Image (tube, rainbow, N blue to C red):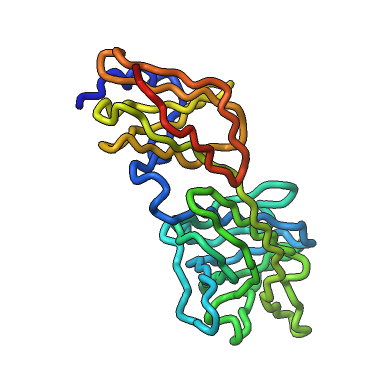
Protein backbone atom coordinates (compact mmCIF):
# COMPACT_ATOMS: atom_id res chain seq x y z
CA UNK A 1 0.00 0.00 0.00
CA UNK A 2 1.27 3.46 -0.83
CA UNK A 3 1.55 5.91 2.07
CA UNK A 4 2.28 9.26 0.45
CA UNK A 5 -0.48 10.86 2.49
CA UNK A 6 1.83 10.77 5.52
CA UNK A 7 4.47 13.11 4.12
CA UNK A 8 2.83 16.55 4.72
CA UNK A 9 2.29 15.90 8.41
CA UNK A 10 5.82 14.55 8.83
CA UNK A 11 7.26 17.82 7.56
CA UNK A 12 5.28 19.93 10.01
CA UNK A 13 6.17 18.25 13.29
CA UNK A 14 8.84 16.40 15.24
CA UNK A 15 8.63 12.73 14.34
CA UNK A 16 10.38 9.64 15.71
CA UNK A 17 9.33 6.81 13.39
CA UNK A 18 11.75 4.33 14.89
CA UNK A 19 9.46 4.15 17.92
CA UNK A 20 6.86 1.95 16.26
CA UNK A 21 7.24 -1.84 16.38
CA UNK A 22 5.00 -3.74 14.01
CA UNK A 23 5.64 -6.98 15.91
CA UNK A 24 3.60 -5.62 18.82
CA UNK A 25 4.84 -6.56 22.30
CA UNK A 26 6.22 -10.01 21.43
CA UNK A 27 9.83 -8.79 21.34
CA UNK A 28 10.34 -8.84 25.11
CA UNK A 29 12.83 -5.98 25.01
CA UNK A 30 13.30 -2.62 26.73
CA UNK A 31 15.24 0.46 25.65
CA UNK A 32 17.94 1.76 28.00
CA UNK A 33 20.00 4.95 27.92
CA UNK A 34 23.05 5.37 30.14
CA UNK A 35 23.74 9.01 30.96
CA UNK A 36 26.46 10.59 33.12
CA UNK A 37 26.30 13.53 35.52
CA UNK A 38 28.61 14.78 38.26
CA UNK A 39 28.93 16.38 41.68
CA UNK A 40 31.48 19.26 41.62
CA UNK A 41 35.08 18.71 42.70
CA UNK A 42 37.87 21.18 43.57
CA UNK A 43 39.75 20.73 40.28
CA UNK A 44 39.84 22.38 36.88
CA UNK A 45 39.19 19.12 35.04
CA UNK A 46 38.61 15.47 35.88
CA UNK A 47 38.94 13.62 32.57
CA UNK A 48 37.67 10.04 32.34
CA UNK A 49 38.26 7.86 29.26
CA UNK A 50 35.09 5.77 28.73
CA UNK A 51 35.47 3.13 26.01
CA UNK A 52 32.57 0.75 26.57
CA UNK A 53 29.50 0.22 28.76
CA UNK A 54 28.13 -3.20 29.70
CA UNK A 55 25.23 -4.42 31.81
CA UNK A 56 24.85 -7.79 33.49
CA UNK A 57 21.65 -9.76 32.98
CA UNK A 58 20.69 -11.39 36.26
CA UNK A 59 21.30 -15.14 36.07
CA UNK A 60 22.11 -16.91 39.33
CA UNK A 61 25.79 -17.87 39.45
CA UNK A 62 26.40 -16.90 35.83
CA UNK A 63 29.22 -14.43 35.13
CA UNK A 64 28.81 -14.74 31.34
CA UNK A 65 25.68 -12.59 31.19
CA UNK A 66 27.43 -9.32 30.29
CA UNK A 67 25.81 -7.41 27.42
CA UNK A 68 27.71 -4.60 25.67
CA UNK A 69 25.53 -1.62 24.82
CA UNK A 70 25.84 -1.30 21.06
CA UNK A 71 25.24 2.44 20.67
CA UNK A 72 28.26 3.86 22.48
CA UNK A 73 29.80 7.34 22.46
CA UNK A 74 33.39 6.53 23.48
CA UNK A 75 35.79 9.27 24.41
CA UNK A 76 37.37 11.36 27.15
CA UNK A 77 34.80 13.17 29.30
CA UNK A 78 35.54 16.00 31.72
CA UNK A 79 33.25 15.15 34.63
CA UNK A 80 33.10 18.79 35.68
CA UNK A 81 31.33 19.65 32.42
CA UNK A 82 28.29 17.79 33.75
CA UNK A 83 27.79 19.37 37.16
CA UNK A 84 24.72 21.28 38.35
CA UNK A 85 22.12 19.07 36.70
CA UNK A 86 23.80 18.65 33.30
CA UNK A 87 24.30 15.19 31.84
CA UNK A 88 25.50 13.48 28.66
CA UNK A 89 24.55 10.30 26.82
CA UNK A 90 27.24 7.60 27.13
CA UNK A 91 25.48 4.65 25.54
CA UNK A 92 22.11 3.15 24.71
CA UNK A 93 20.77 -0.17 23.53
CA UNK A 94 17.77 -2.44 23.26
CA UNK A 95 18.03 -5.07 25.99
CA UNK A 96 16.10 -8.22 26.91
CA UNK A 97 13.38 -7.48 29.45
CA UNK A 98 14.11 -8.73 32.95
CA UNK A 99 16.43 -7.99 35.84
CA UNK A 100 19.84 -6.40 35.40
CA UNK A 101 22.14 -6.52 38.41
CA UNK A 102 25.26 -4.55 37.48
CA UNK A 103 26.77 -2.09 35.04
CA UNK A 104 30.44 -2.09 34.05
CA UNK A 105 32.36 0.86 32.63
CA UNK A 106 35.38 -0.12 30.53
CA UNK A 107 37.91 2.70 30.89
CA UNK A 108 40.80 3.55 28.59
CA UNK A 109 44.24 4.86 29.54
CA UNK A 110 43.66 8.57 28.84
CA UNK A 111 42.39 9.53 32.29
CA UNK A 112 43.83 12.77 33.64
CA UNK A 113 43.46 15.47 36.26
CA UNK A 114 43.98 19.21 35.80
CA UNK A 115 44.66 21.00 39.06
CA UNK A 116 43.67 24.57 39.90
CA UNK A 117 47.22 25.77 39.16
CA UNK A 118 46.99 24.34 35.63
CA UNK A 119 49.12 21.25 36.31
CA UNK A 120 47.96 18.19 34.36
CA UNK A 121 48.72 14.76 35.79
CA UNK A 122 47.60 11.24 34.84
CA UNK A 123 44.85 9.54 36.79
CA UNK A 124 45.96 5.99 37.43
CA UNK A 125 43.33 3.26 37.44
CA UNK A 126 44.07 0.60 40.10
CA UNK A 127 44.85 -2.87 38.72
CA UNK A 128 41.69 -4.28 40.28
CA UNK A 129 39.62 -2.11 37.93
CA UNK A 130 41.39 -2.99 34.68
CA UNK A 131 38.49 -5.29 33.73
CA UNK A 132 36.04 -2.43 34.28
CA UNK A 133 34.41 -0.42 37.04
CA UNK A 134 31.46 -2.47 38.31
CA UNK A 135 28.43 -0.77 39.87
CA UNK A 136 25.33 -2.30 41.42
CA UNK A 137 21.97 -1.58 39.72
CA UNK A 138 19.39 -4.26 40.59
CA UNK A 139 16.71 -2.88 38.27
CA UNK A 140 13.78 -4.64 36.60
CA UNK A 141 13.29 -3.75 32.93
CA UNK A 142 9.76 -4.23 31.65
CA UNK A 143 9.05 -5.05 28.02
CA UNK A 144 8.62 -2.11 25.61
CA UNK A 145 9.42 0.57 28.24
CA UNK A 146 12.24 3.13 27.86
CA UNK A 147 14.59 3.62 30.83
CA UNK A 148 17.37 6.03 31.74
CA UNK A 149 20.24 4.87 33.95
CA UNK A 150 21.98 7.92 35.41
CA UNK A 151 25.57 7.54 36.61
CA UNK A 152 26.15 10.27 39.20
CA UNK A 153 29.93 10.60 39.61
CA UNK A 154 31.33 12.21 42.74
CA UNK A 155 34.44 13.88 41.29
CA UNK A 156 35.84 14.91 44.69
CA UNK A 157 35.68 11.37 46.11
CA UNK A 158 36.69 9.68 42.85
CA UNK A 159 40.14 11.31 42.81
CA UNK A 160 42.49 9.94 45.48
CA UNK A 161 45.86 11.61 46.18
CA UNK A 162 48.74 9.12 46.52
CA UNK A 163 50.97 11.49 48.52
CA UNK A 164 53.76 11.70 45.94
CA UNK A 165 52.15 14.18 43.59
CA UNK A 166 50.26 11.40 41.81
CA UNK A 167 46.57 10.57 41.85
CA UNK A 168 44.44 7.47 41.51
CA UNK A 169 41.04 7.27 39.87
CA UNK A 170 38.69 5.25 42.07
CA UNK A 171 35.24 6.14 40.74
CA UNK A 172 32.56 6.77 43.34
CA UNK A 173 29.31 6.59 41.42
CA UNK A 174 25.67 6.57 42.46
CA UNK A 175 23.32 4.80 40.03
CA UNK A 176 19.73 5.96 39.47
CA UNK A 177 17.40 4.01 37.17
CA UNK A 178 13.93 5.24 36.20
CA UNK A 179 11.40 4.71 33.46
CA UNK A 180 11.00 7.74 31.22
CA UNK A 181 8.47 6.51 28.69
CA UNK A 182 5.79 3.96 27.95
CA UNK A 183 3.89 3.22 24.79
CA UNK A 184 0.56 2.69 23.03
CA UNK A 185 -0.54 -0.52 21.34
CA UNK A 186 -3.66 -2.03 19.81
CA UNK A 187 -5.13 -3.69 16.74
CA UNK A 188 -6.85 -2.00 13.81
CA UNK A 189 -9.63 -3.57 11.75
CA UNK A 190 -9.92 -4.20 8.91
CA UNK A 191 -6.25 -5.21 9.06
CA UNK A 192 -5.71 -4.76 5.32
CA UNK A 193 -5.97 -0.97 5.68
CA UNK A 194 -2.55 -0.95 7.47
CA UNK A 195 -2.96 2.72 8.50
CA UNK A 196 -0.29 5.20 9.39
CA UNK A 197 -0.45 6.05 13.09
CA UNK A 198 0.39 9.35 14.78
CA UNK A 199 0.62 9.87 18.53
CA UNK A 200 0.39 13.65 18.96
CA UNK A 201 1.08 15.62 22.15
CA UNK A 202 -0.48 18.92 23.17
CA UNK A 203 2.70 20.63 21.88
CA UNK A 204 2.22 18.91 18.49
CA UNK A 205 5.28 16.70 18.95
CA UNK A 206 4.54 13.48 17.08
CA UNK A 207 5.65 9.87 17.40
CA UNK A 208 4.38 7.40 14.86
CA UNK A 209 4.57 4.40 12.61
CA UNK A 210 2.34 1.85 10.86
CA UNK A 211 0.16 -1.11 11.73
CA UNK A 212 1.40 -4.42 10.33
CA UNK A 213 -0.42 -6.81 8.02
CA UNK A 214 -2.26 -8.32 10.99
CA UNK A 215 -3.43 -4.89 12.10
CA UNK A 216 -1.21 -4.85 15.19
CA UNK A 217 0.70 -1.75 16.22
CA UNK A 218 2.97 -0.71 19.08
CA UNK A 219 4.33 2.82 19.40
CA UNK A 220 7.21 2.82 21.90
CA UNK A 221 9.07 5.60 23.68
CA UNK A 222 6.00 7.72 24.48
CA UNK A 223 6.69 10.08 27.43
CA UNK A 224 4.05 10.47 30.13
CA UNK A 225 1.23 12.76 28.99
CA UNK A 226 -2.12 13.07 27.25
CA UNK A 227 -2.16 12.29 23.53
CA UNK A 228 -4.35 12.26 20.45
CA UNK A 229 -3.89 9.12 18.35
CA UNK A 230 -4.73 9.50 14.66
CA UNK A 231 -5.04 6.70 12.11
CA UNK A 232 -4.56 7.60 8.43
CA UNK A 233 -5.32 5.46 5.38
CA UNK A 234 -4.63 5.90 1.67
CA UNK A 235 -6.80 8.68 0.28
CA UNK A 236 -8.00 9.59 3.78
CA UNK A 237 -10.96 7.28 3.21
CA UNK A 238 -10.88 5.50 6.57
CA UNK A 239 -9.30 7.88 9.04
CA UNK A 240 -9.99 7.73 12.76
CA UNK A 241 -9.01 9.81 15.79
CA UNK A 242 -8.85 8.68 19.42
CA UNK A 243 -8.67 11.57 21.89
CA UNK A 244 -7.35 11.90 25.44
CA UNK A 245 -5.13 8.81 25.60
CA UNK A 246 -3.27 9.01 28.91
CA UNK A 247 0.23 7.51 29.08
CA UNK A 248 2.25 7.22 32.28
CA UNK A 249 5.85 6.17 32.74
CA UNK A 250 6.45 2.43 32.82
CA UNK A 251 3.11 1.71 31.10
CA UNK A 252 1.98 0.35 27.74
CA UNK A 253 -1.58 1.59 27.08
CA UNK A 254 -3.69 -0.93 25.16
CA UNK A 255 -6.32 0.71 22.93
CA UNK A 256 -7.69 -2.71 22.11
CA UNK A 257 -9.52 -3.07 18.79
CA UNK A 258 -9.71 0.13 16.75
CA UNK A 259 -12.29 -0.10 13.95
CA UNK A 260 -11.74 2.01 10.86
CA UNK A 261 -15.08 2.78 9.21
Image coords of residue 1 (percent x, y): 20, 27
Question: Percent position (x, y) of residue 63?
Answer: 50, 82
The residue at the point 47 percent across, 25 percent down is 229
Q: In the picture, which quadrant includes the C terminus?
A: top left
Front-lying residue, 230 or 115? 230
Horizontally, is 149 left or right of 237 in the view?
right
Residue 241 in the image: above or below residue 245? above
**Residue 162 to residue 134: above or below:** below
Q: Quadrant of residue 99?
A: bottom right
- State whether residue 85 is above or below residue 202: below
User: Can I make out residue 107 in this image?
Assistant: no
Q: Quadrant of residue 5?
A: top left
Labels in figure, total: 0
Measuring 32% from the left and 21% from the top, which residue is drawn there?
A: 6
Whether residue 44 sits left or right of residue 12 in the image: it is: right
Where is residue 148? Give x, y as percent: 59, 52
The answer to whether residue 155 is above or below residue 240 is below
Q: In the rendered image, is residue 218 in sight?
A: yes
Q: What residue lies at 74% left-to-right and 80% top-to-bottom?
A: 165
As drawn, the residue found furthest toward the left would be 1
Give the residue at x 73% y 64%: 155
Estimate the x, y position of residue 103 in percent, counting from the top left: 57, 69
Amino acid sequence: MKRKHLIPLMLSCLVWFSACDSDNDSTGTAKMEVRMTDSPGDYEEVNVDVQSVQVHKEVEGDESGWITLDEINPGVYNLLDFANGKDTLLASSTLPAGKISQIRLILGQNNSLKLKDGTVTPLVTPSGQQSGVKLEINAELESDVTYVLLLDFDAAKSVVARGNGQYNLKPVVRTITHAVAGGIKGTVTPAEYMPGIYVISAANDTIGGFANESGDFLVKGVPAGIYTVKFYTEGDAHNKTVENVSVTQNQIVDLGAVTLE
